Each structure stands twice: as structure tokens, then as C-alpha cells.
Image: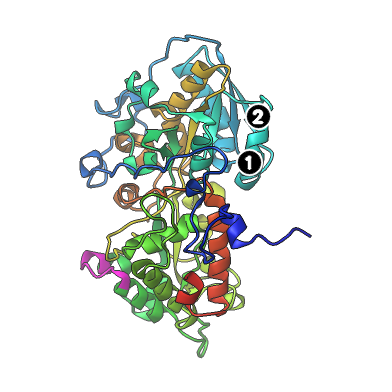
């Protein structure tokens, strides 16, 4: 049986004088292993880069090349090296289902490039464990699938190279053309390590029938009245939470979200708190604004019982789709009929943004990118694949699969974006969520920190101690 990981061991700082979850110095301050500098804060998104309303599009049958002068078609590039790119991906349903269409689009955009695609036999957690051995053994791809949770690992470990210079020389791949909140997920020390090709956005879906039956004001109306704040959100969840009575079963406010630190951080940010200090040397979740956010959210779980989670889940065996839960977090991929998720709902659906906290409307997203390993044998071919996947032709294929949002504001003008919307979806709201995303800048040993947080949240829900004690 493996030895339980201690807080001190997890943070990798044996000489640290601190022993609490929030007080331990992070790996960047330890002076052990590879020297990794603190990441700079991601560049802030600018309003000018984002459509303020739903894009005006032509007929859904209009070709991508006719989508508007603001969207340039992808021209074939001239090969400067070997024409075969070895591409390492993960088992993502959208990518696998769209692979044939993507390869066909690649044949038109860059006819001489051949993509040899390998699917990593495991999930992202297994990749974290094996990547150093994989790369150290010389089995290095030309293009590497990137997820936000491995940005620090891949860039801090110098496994992938920045793409800023390549993008600056490529008129079709300007970094400024992407949603900056999406690109920020793949920045390290101010440099981009990949080009995004997928972004699911972030929004709330709600049961319109349940709101109507209970006579409650919908989130859209509250938002239009500038009342979709923390108080408006929390009050709505409490109003939705009712015991069984008569012929009606119990109802509850919201289906629980992931408590992983990758996602929980947004609850803290909206309240004005932070996860790490600016230099990434301390975890600061025990500071007032962060601790207050954790306290308020835990009260909704424990005191108000307004979230569906393990303690009450038996009352709601089908979760949100059972019809007795008011709201749920969603991303674009969960809307796609191919996922057999929200498309199976037997009640009317509505869409709303996340509430606006004291620090504003901030959300987390889970975009994906491709980057180029430093030791890639065919780096030019790897770049050609990377720029194709971040370009117009791949975006058209992927949006038609109804599982992703445009990674660039200009791509929202493509007919494929309008075609990808279900009648109840709000395209402008989806695009707005791309503006209000924030990347979690990570220390080099983020995975260990995230593991400790998961245990801390578990202890909070188990009422092992008061919130502040567990955070200190």
C-alpha cells in the first residue's frame, strides 16, 4: 500500500518552516530540480477583440471563404522540411469523431502535409506521470496535444517551445487574433506554447419548466436587472431547494460542479480572492477574500443543502436530467447531440451566464491546443499541423460537430457557428464567456497542490473542522 502523501512532501520543500496547507512554500522557491522562474500574469483580454452581440451570419450553407472579409481563408503553406508530422493526441470524442473530416480539410489547406496521428493510451493524469520518460527516451512527437493542466509541466520542463516567433511570421496565425482568455491558458512566462483549436466556453443551463412551476425569476431576467450577483445566485438556489410534498418530489438548486482546483478557483476569483501569490511561491487560499468564498459556497452545500452532491444524491438519481434540479454548469460539448447529454432532456432548457461577483464575472474554461516539442525531429511539419488546427478550415469542421466554440472572434462570423447552435442556446452569451475566462497560472508542482486542495474540500464537506481551520 503506498505511503500517504504528506503536505510537506507534496509541496517538495523539505526545508520549509511551514506545515499548513496554505503556508508551505511552493516548489519554485525550493531550489530543487530544474530551475523554473515564476510565470508572468497572463495578458488581459481586451473588449475590442470580442463581438459585443451575436454575430450576423449569412445562410448556413454559405462556404467558409464567403463568411466575410474579416475571416481570411487558410492558404496552403510551402513545405520547408519533411512533409510528415507525427502528432500525439489524447482520446477526445470530438477530435476522434471529426478526424476524417479534419484530414480531408488538411489535404486542401496543406496538400503536401501528412499527419501521422497517435492517441496516447491513457488520460491526462497518466500522461503527467509518463511524459518525462516518454520524451527522455527519444519518443518525441512533432506536434503535441496540450491541456491547460499541463502547461506548467510542458513549458516549465522545457519540453515544448514557444510559438510566438512562428506566429509572428505567419499572417494566418497571429496570436492577437485569438481570444486572449483562451490563449492565456497556454502561456508560460509571457510566451505562448501552442495555438488553441478547441474551447468549450462556460455557462449555466437551467430547467425552465421547474422555474415556471415554482414561480421563480429566471437567471436571464435577474441578469438583465443587474441582480445576477452572488446574492441573486445564492438566493435562487435556496428558492429552488424544497422538500418533497404531495405529488411533487424534492427539488434542489444546482448540480454540484467539479471541486478540482482547476475549476474551483473561479469561485474564489469572483469573490476577489487568489489561489497563489503573485510570485507563485505561496498558496493564499486562507486569505480573507478566498476563505470567504470557500465559506459561502460550503454553506450552500451544508447549511442550505442547495447543491446536489454525495450527501443527498440518492434523492436525485438522474441528476439534472431527472428534472428536479434547477441549474447545472455546462460547456458547448455537452450540448452536442452526439454526447447524448443535454439533448436528452425531457424539459425546456434555458441558458444563463455565471453570476457576477465582487470581482466581476470570471469563469474557467477547458480549451485545448497543439504545440511543438523542443526536440521534435520535424518541427516545421509540427508547426504546419499546429497552425492548421488553430485555423479556419479546422474550425469549420469542428464547429459543425456542435462541440466547440470559435477560438478566434473572427471565426464567430463563419456560418458553422450559427449552424452549431440549438434553438435554446444564446450565441452571444457563449462568446461573452470566452471574454471572461481566466487562466490559472500554475507553479511547477501544481498537481500536488491540486491534490491537497481536493482533500481539503472533502474534509470541509465532511465537517471535520471549520473552513478557516482547514485552510490555515
Up/down of 276 relative to 388, above or below: below
Up/down of 217 relative to 4, above or below: below
The verdict on residue 223 being magenta is yes
Judging depth in this view, the residue of 144 and 397 nearest the camera is 144
In the rendered image, is residue 326 in sight?
A: yes
The image shows residue 179 at horizontal and vertical percentages of 33, 39
The image shows residue 451 at horizontal and vertical percentages of 58, 58
Identify the residue under disc 2.
136
Find the magenta span and give its range. Answer: 222-230
Q: Residue at x 55, y 11 (%)?
A: 82
**Quarter location, residue 310:** bottom right
Instruction: Classify mark 1: residues with Cα within 10 Å, few (<14), some (14-19) or many (20+).
Output: some
Outermost residue on the right side: it is 1
Q: Residue at x 63, y 36 (%)?
A: 131
Judging depth in this view, the residue of 430 and 23 nearest the camera is 23
Give the left or right position of residue 133, taking residue 279 as reference.
Answer: right
Identify the residue under disc 1.
127
Q: Name the element at disc 2.
A: helix
The image shows residue 56 at horizontal and vertical percentages of 25, 40
Which quadrant of the rendered structure holds the N terminus?
A: bottom right
Up/down of 33 relative to 345, above or below: above
Judging depth in this view, the residue of 146 and 308 nearest the camera is 146
The image shows residue 340 at horizontal and vertical percentages of 56, 53
Determine whether label 2 and label 1 are within 8 Å by CB.
no
Amino acid at each position: 500500500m503506498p505511503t500517504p502523501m504528506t503536505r510537506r512532501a507534496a509541496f517538495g520543500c523539505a526545508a520549509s518552516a511551514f506545515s499548513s496547507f496554505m503556508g508551505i512554500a511552493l516548489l519554485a522557491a525550493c531550489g530543487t530540480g530544474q530551475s523554473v522562474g515564476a510565470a508572468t500574469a497572463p495578458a488581459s483580454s481586451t473588449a475590442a477583440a470580442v463581438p459585443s452581440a451575436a454575430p450576423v451570419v449569412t445562410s448556413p450553407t454559405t462556404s467558409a471563404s464567403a463568411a466575410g472579409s474579416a475571416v481570411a481563408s487558410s492558404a496552403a503553406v510551402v513545405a520547408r522540411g519533411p512533409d510528415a508530422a507525427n502528432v500525439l493526441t489524447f482520446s477526445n470524442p470530438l477530435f476522434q469523431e471529426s478526424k476524417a473530416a479534419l484530414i480531408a480539410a488538411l489535404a486542401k489547406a496543406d496538400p503536401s502535409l501528412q499527419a501521422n496521428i497517435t492517441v496516447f493510451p491513457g488520460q491526462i493524469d497518466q500522461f503527467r506521470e509518463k511524459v518525462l520518460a516518454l520524451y527522455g527516451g527519444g519518443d518525441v512527437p512533432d506536434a503535441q496535444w496540450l491541456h491547460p493542466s499541463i502547461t506548467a509541466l510542458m513549458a516549465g520542463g522545457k519540453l515544448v517551445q514557444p510559438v510566438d516567433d512562428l506566429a509572428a511570421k505567419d499572417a494566418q496565425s497571429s496570436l492577437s487574433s485569438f481570444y486572449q482568455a483562451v490563449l492565456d491558458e497556454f502561456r508560460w512566462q509571457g510566451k505562448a506554447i501552442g495555438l488553441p483549436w478547441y474551447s468549450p466556453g462556460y455557462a449555466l443551463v437551467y430547467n425552465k419548466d421547474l422555474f415556471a412551476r415554482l414561480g421563480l425569476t429566471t437567471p436571464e431576467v435577474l441578469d438583465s436587472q443587474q441582480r445576477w450577483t452572488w446574492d441573486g445566485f445564492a438566493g435562487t438556489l435556496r428558492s429552488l431547494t424544497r422538500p418533497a410534498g404531495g405529488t411533487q418530489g424534492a427539488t434542489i438548486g444546482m448540480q454540484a460542479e467539479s471541486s478540482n482546483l482547476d475549476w474551483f478557483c473561479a469561485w474564489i476569483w469572483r469573490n476577489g480572492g487568489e489561489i497563489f501569490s503573485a510570485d507563485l511561491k505561496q498558496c493564499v487560499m486562507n486569505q480573507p477574500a478566498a476563505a470567504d468564498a470557500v465559506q459561502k459556497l460550503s454553506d450552500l452545500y451544508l447549511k442550505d443543502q442547495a447543491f446536489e452532491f454525495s450527501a443527498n444524491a440518492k434523492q436525485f438519481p438522474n441528476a439534472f436530467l431527472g428534472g428536479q434540479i434547477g441549474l447545472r454548469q455546462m460547456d458547448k460539448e455537452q450540448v452536442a447531440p452526439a454526447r447524448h447529454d443535454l439533448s436528452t432532456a425531457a424539459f425546456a432548457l434555458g441558458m444563463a451566464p455565471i453570476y457576477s461577483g465582487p470581482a466581476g464575472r470570471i469563469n474557467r474554461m477547458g480549451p485545448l491546443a497543439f504545440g511543438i516539442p523542443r526536440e521534435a525531429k520535424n518541427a516545421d511539419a509540427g508547426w504546419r499541423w499546429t497552425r492548421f488546427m488553430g485555423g479556419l478550415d479546422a474550425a469549420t469542421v469542428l464547429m459543425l460537430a456542435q462541440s466547440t466554440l470559435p477560438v478566434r472572434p473572427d471565426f464567430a462570423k463563419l456560418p458553422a457557428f450559427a449552424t452549431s447552435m440549438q434553438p435554446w442556446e444564446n450565441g452571444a452569451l457563449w462568446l461573452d464567456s470566452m471574454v471572461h475566462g481566466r487562466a490559472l497560472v500554475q507553479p511547477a508542482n501544481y498537481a500536488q497542490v491540486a491534490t491537497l486542495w481536493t482533500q481539503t474540500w472533502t474534509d470541509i464537506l465532511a465537517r471535520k473542522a471549520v473552513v478557516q481551520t482547514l485552510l490555515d
